[in-house]
Amino acid sequence: VNENLKKLSSTKNEISYKLMSVIEHKGNAFGGHYQTYRRTRKVDVLGDEGMSSPKREYQPEWALVSDESVVLRTWSDVRRCQAYMLFYVAI
């Protein structure tokens, strides 16, 4: 085993990544459609119970973007898609 490779793999300064976008292809090799699951900002919304006992609701952190629509989705939806390409950002 190459000594330089050992040094690189044992480095303590690991880089963490956050998944930001997933591209999915619906169709086959001869045709189809691409759509994107994209991370959005988490929105904290107070529920209907008023300020005395606020019920916090969290909107989904993901949006499904297609040709003419944007629909909020959950992480569970993203996990189930047939990913074609993944985009990450270093954190």
Image (tube, rainbow, N blue to C red):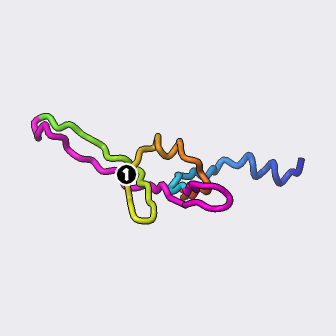
Report the residue at 59% width, 51% height from top: 83
Q: Secondary structure at mark 1?
A: strand
Q: Which residue is mark 1?
A: 72
**Between 21 and 77, which is closer to the camera in this rendering?**
77
The residue type indicated by label 1 comes to Leu
Instruction: Give the number of marks.
Output: 1
Task: State the residue at coordinates (30%, 43%).
Answer: 58
Using the rendered view, name the quadrant where residue 63 is placed: bottom left
Asked whether, in this view, residue 21 is left or right of residue 47, the answer is right
On screen, residue 51 versus residue 11, left or right, reads: left
Residue 27 covered by magenta stretch: yes
Decide if residue 6 is on the left or right side of residue 54. Answer: right
Near-viewer residue (8 or 77): 77
Locate residue 83 relative to residue 4 in the image: left or right.
Answer: left
Q: Main secondary structure of the magenta part?
A: strand
* 42, 68: nearer the viewer: 68
Rendering coords of residue 28 (x, y %): 64, 55
Residue appearing at x 26%, y 41% in the figure: 57
Is 32 within the magenta?
Answer: yes
State which quadrant residue 22 falls in: bottom right
The magenta segment: 23-52
Residue 42 image point, x, y percent: 35, 50
Q: Dot 1, how many residues are within 10 Å of its Cα: few (below 14), some (14-19), or many (20+)?
A: some
Coordinates of residue 72 in the picture (x, y in percent): 37, 51
Farthest residue, direction right = 1
Q: Residue furthest bottom?
A: 67
Residue at the top extreme of this rendering:
53
Q: x, y (%) of residue 43?
A: 30, 51
